Amino acid sequence: GTGSMSAKSFEKQGVFQNFVGFFDENSSAGVNDKIRDFFQEPMMTPAMVLQNMFKFQPSASRNVSSQEHVKLQIEALSAIHTGSTMLDLVMHDPGAYADLWPMIAISHAIYPAYLCRGKLQGRLEFP
C-alpha cells in the first residue's frame, strides 16, 4: 500500500469511517446499512477490504482455528473475485444489469469482510 495510519485516525476520514465496521464482530449494522455504506465509495471500498482483510484476526470467542481462518480468507478472496466479475458485467451494460448492484456490494466487500471479521492487527493501509 501507499500509506498506513492508525484505525482511530482512519475512522475520521469521511467516506471511510464505516469501513472498519464491515469487519466488526459486534456490529449491529444490518446488511442494508452496510450496502448503503458501501455505496459511499463503491470503487474504493472493495480495494480497502482486499488490502486489509488479512490484518483482522478472529476473537477467541469465535473459536476459529488457524486452518479455518485461512479457509475463510480464501473464501473471501473468491467472493471478491465474484463481485469483480459482476462489476465488469454491470459496467459493460449498466442499464441491463443495474439490479446487481446490491449483490456486488455484498460479494465485493460486505461478505469478505464478514468472513475475515475480528480485531485489527497492525495498521490499516490504503491501496
Image (spheres, helix red, strand yellow):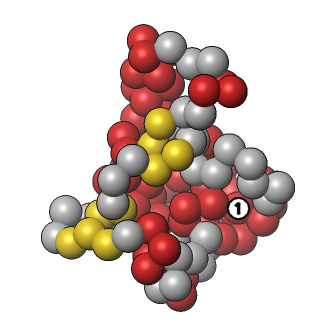
The image quarter in which residue 98 lies = bottom right
78 or 12, nearer to the observer: 12
Task: Tell me if residue 6 comes above or below residue 79 in the rendering.
Answer: below
SS label for mark 1 = helix
Q: Position of residue 104 (x, y in %)?
A: 58, 53
Residue at 63 percent of width and 18 percent of height? 63
32 or 97, nearer to the observer: 32
The image quarter in which residue 10 lies = bottom left
Q: Residue furthest left?
A: 2
Residue at 66 percent of width and 25 percent of height? 62
Q: Quadrant of the N terminus?
A: bottom left
Q: Quadrant of the C terminus?
A: bottom left
Residue on which disc 1 sits = 34
10 Å neighbourhood of mark 1: few (<14), some, or many (≥20)? some
Residue at 48 percent of width and 74 percent of height? 8
Q: Position of residue 25 (x, y in %)?
A: 68, 44
